[in-house]
Structures are given as C-alpha cells and as structure tokens.
Amino acid sequence: MLVKYIYNIKGQLTAPRHPRGKGACLKRMNAVRIDPGAASPAGPAMPPLRKEKAKILVTGFQSYAGRSANPSEQVAHALDGMTIGGMAVRGQGLAVDFHKVRRDLPALIDTLRPRAIVSLGLWPGEPMIRIERMAANWSWFELPDNAGHRQNGKVVDDGPDGYLTSLPADAMQAAIRSAGRPCRQSGSAGTYLCNATTY
C-alpha cells in the first residue's frame, strides 16, 4: 500500500485528505512511517523541498521627456540583489510605455510572485518623498510616452474607479522622517504612468 504525502507552504510534511474522512487518513498516516528521503516502490527517492526566499519587487521608470536618467530606475537598480528583512530584492526598470507596462509588469509579477511590490516614480519638481495612497482608473497624459502614445481615458476599460494601495503608508512615512528625509502622503498618483502602474 502506498501512502501519498504532501508538503505545505512551510515545507513541512502533512497528511493528505482522504475520501473516507479525517479518521481514516490519520489512521493510515500513523500506521506507516513516511520518510521523504527514502526510496519507494513508486520510484527513486524524493528530492528535498527547496524553500525559496521571499521576494520584494522594486520598480522604477526609465528616462523620459529628454532626461538623461530617472532616479526611480537608479534606486531600483541599486537595491537589486540586496536582502532586506530576510527577503531578496529584485529591482527592475520599466519602459515609459503605457502598453508595455500593461503587458510586462503583470507577467513579471506572475514570474516572481513577490511578497511585496514597491513602485517608484519621478514627479519633476517634487521636493520630498511622496507615498501614494490610491490609484485612479483614469489616465490623462500631458505628454506622450516614449512610444509616442498619449493615453487619455481609462487605464482598464471595465475596471473599478480606483484602488487603495496596501502599503503601510503611516509606518513608511514615520521611518523615512526618522531617517531625516522629508516625506508626505498623497491621495493622487497623478494621471501619467505612475498612476497607471499603481492601478
């Protein structure tokens, strides 16, 4: 008799569900000692489960509107490869292109499956770090993106009017200010790509 075994998300061996109920399942599990590293009649030994380190995705934008560089992308690249809070940081630059962001960012999230996402952007003339609290389903590009496109309308045609971010904005603001950097919270991410990306 073969007894199936599964790993939970913490990498611990757990009893599977049994069609005859919990009691039957536990009885079988107690009757047979299961060793994940031992060979079984079904084939060779099962390799040990590798616990992958959780990830933080940090994004910034490439340069645009004739600027030689974008500090949001520079920060993302500087953080790439670091470990913060026990999690690996993946820094990624995004094209200043509405259609590419809509296609590439969801694909990147699906691939990395990060625990948290922090998106950075540049607001020319802003004298301090600004933490955005929400994104609106509306774009009004005052200047075209790097592909020449000017999005004037909804970000997602059938989407809700807006989303609140889930970042701990109060704690972030307090930490940034305690480090001696000016910071404030904002209820609008604008109408350009920062807003579209957040949405």
Image (cartoon, grey):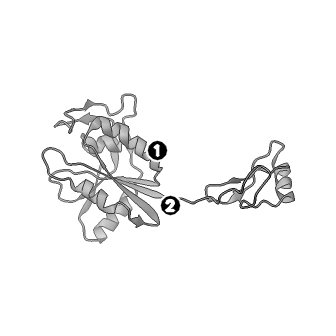
| Residue type, label 1 | Asp
Task: Give the residue at x 50% y 61%.
Answer: 53
Residue closest to the far front: 44
74 lies above or below 165 = below
- Where's the C terminus, which quadrant? top left
Camera-nearest residue between 65 and 23: 65
> Which of disc 2 and disc 1 is earlier in sequence?
2
Among the 4 quarters of the image, the one containing residue 159: top left
Q: Residues within 10 Å of mark 2 (few under 14, many from 20)?
A: few
Q: How many marks?
A: 2
Please tell me the numbered disc located at residue 10: none
SS type, badge 2? loop
User: Residue 37 is drawn in which quadrant?
Assistant: bottom right
Of residues 191 and 20, the one drawn nearer to the viewer in this rendering: 20
As drawn, 41 above or below 190: below
**Image x and y of residue 169, in percent:** 36, 57
* 183 in relation to 117, above or below: below
Give the residue pinned by disc 1: 110
Residue lying furthest bottom: 179
Indicate left or right for 10 with 79 as reference.
right
> How far across and down, in percent of the image, does residue 79 sit?
33, 62
User: Residue 53's mark?
Assistant: 2
How dense is the environment of label 1, judged by Cα within 10 Å: few (below 14), some, or many (20 and up)? few
Q: Measure how far apart labels 1 and 2 are at the Cα level.
A: 16 Å
Which residue is drawn at the image coordinates 27% and 59% (left, top)? Answer: 75
Q: Is 129 positioned to the left or the right of 112 in the image?
A: left
Q: Residue furthest left?
A: 66
Q: Nearer the viewer, residue 144 or 152?
A: 144
- Percent x, y for residue 73? 26, 54
Residue sitting at x 45%, y 50%? 112
Please tell me whether mark 1 sits on a helix, a strand or a loop.
Answer: helix
Tell me which amino acid carries mark 2.
Lys
